[in-house]
């Protein structure tokens, strides 16, 4: 079962899909544009993985310094970065290259500390879609992301649905794609992750305790392109959801 969290009529609601949009937990059926979509669960720590698809590493090879034995590239995000489905993401006026990243987001359901790879999937509650924007102008050291590239307000979009792990037979066999203004610009498959979900849970839990609601963003394939103010960006993962986002300028945020 898919579920979402939305705001409507001055209250927060759980919601499920409906042919006409979504059904609130009180039985009302609404169109998608009648509600404010929130991240579909109470989000804890957000841990993002960079360079976790080999084709994306190749795409960025001129900017990177990588070795075959490098550990997973992980970094955390603050709550201000998060918005939901149909939300607006700000593109700073001084940015010359800002791109989307369609990613499978893994939601932790049980505390995980020093978890073995073979036990890791027991700690996964489910999945959602993430569009994790990057502003490449601010990349400072040319081989590792930094805060100004990847932890900006409104630049981490989650949703629309949380899908329970039991409803996803194989999270490592999901097609994903991005469309900009209706044109497909990125395609890939979770089968091509460098570090799969059990490896990521084991690695991260070796140095921190993962808690329910924590999210692991598992990286993106190649095909990232610059987006502009006014663009509609849709990130899709088969069986998980279709996440819609619009790029806006500084003026929308009073800047």
Image: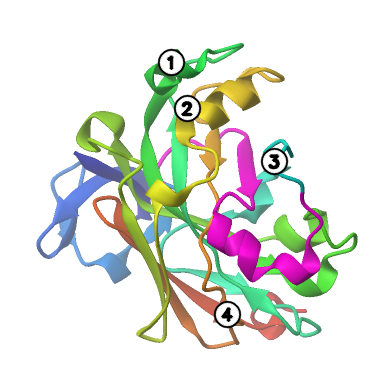
- Please state, as top left, top right, bottom left or bottom right, where the C terminus lies in the image: bottom right
Q: Position of residue 185 (x, y in %)?
A: 44, 79
User: Do labels 1 and 4 touch, CB within 8 Å?
Assistant: no
| Residue hosting label 1 | 118
**Image height of 24 relative to 29, above or below:** above
Circle nearer the N terminus (1, 2): 1
- Please state, as top left, top right, bottom left or bottom right, where the N terminus lies in the image: top left
Q: What secondary structure is found at the residue carrying circle 2?
A: helix
Give the spatial CA distance, label 3 vs label 1. 21 Å
User: Do labels 3 and 1 touch, CB within 8 Å?
Assistant: no
User: Do labels 1 and 2 touch, CB within 8 Å?
Assistant: yes
Nearer to us: label 3 or label 2: 2
| Residue hosting label 4 | 225
| Residue hosting label 2 | 198
Q: Where is residue 228 in the image (x, y as percent from the top left)?
A: 60, 87
| Residue hosting label 3 | 74
Any magenta on residue 117?
no
Q: What secondary structure is found at the residue carrying circle 1?
A: helix
Mark 1: few/some/many CA within 10 Å (<14, 14-19, 20+): few
Left or right: where does residue 63 sit relative to residue 40? right
Q: Is residue 2 visible?
A: yes
Give the spatial CA distance, label 1 vs label 2. 7 Å
């Amino acid at each position: 079962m898919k579920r979402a969290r939305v705001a409507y009529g001055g209250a927060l609601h759980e919601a499920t899909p409906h042919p006409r949009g979504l059904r609130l937990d009180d039985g009302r059926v609404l169109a998608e544009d009648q509600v404010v979509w929130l991240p579909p669960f109470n989000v804890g720590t957000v841990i993002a993985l960079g360079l976790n698809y080999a084709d994306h590493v190749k795409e960025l090879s001129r900017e990177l310094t990588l070795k075959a034995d490098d550990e997973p590239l992980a970094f955390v995000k603050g709550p201000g970065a998060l918005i939901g489905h149909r939300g607006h993401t700000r593109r700073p006026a001084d940015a010359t290259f800002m791109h989307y990243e369609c990613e499978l987001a893994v939601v932790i359901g049980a505390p995980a500390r020093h978890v073995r790879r073979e036990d890791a999937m027991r700690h996964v509650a489910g999945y959602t879609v993430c569009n994790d924007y990057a502003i490449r102008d601010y990349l400072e050291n040319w081989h590792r992301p930094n805060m100004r590239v990847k932890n900006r307000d409104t630049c981490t979009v989650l949703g629309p649905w949380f899908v329970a792990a039991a409803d996803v037979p194989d999270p490592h066999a999901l097609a994903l794609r991005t469309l900009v203004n209706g044109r497909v610009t990125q395609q890939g498959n979770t089968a091509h992750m460098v570090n799969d979900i059990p490896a990521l849970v084991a690695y991260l839990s070796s140095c921190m305790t993962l808690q329910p609601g924590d999210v692991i963003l598992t990286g993106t394939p190649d095909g990232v392109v610059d987006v502009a103010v006014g663009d509609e960006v849709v990130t899709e993962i088969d069986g998980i959801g279709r996440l819609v986002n619009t790029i806006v300028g500084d003026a929308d945020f009073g800047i």
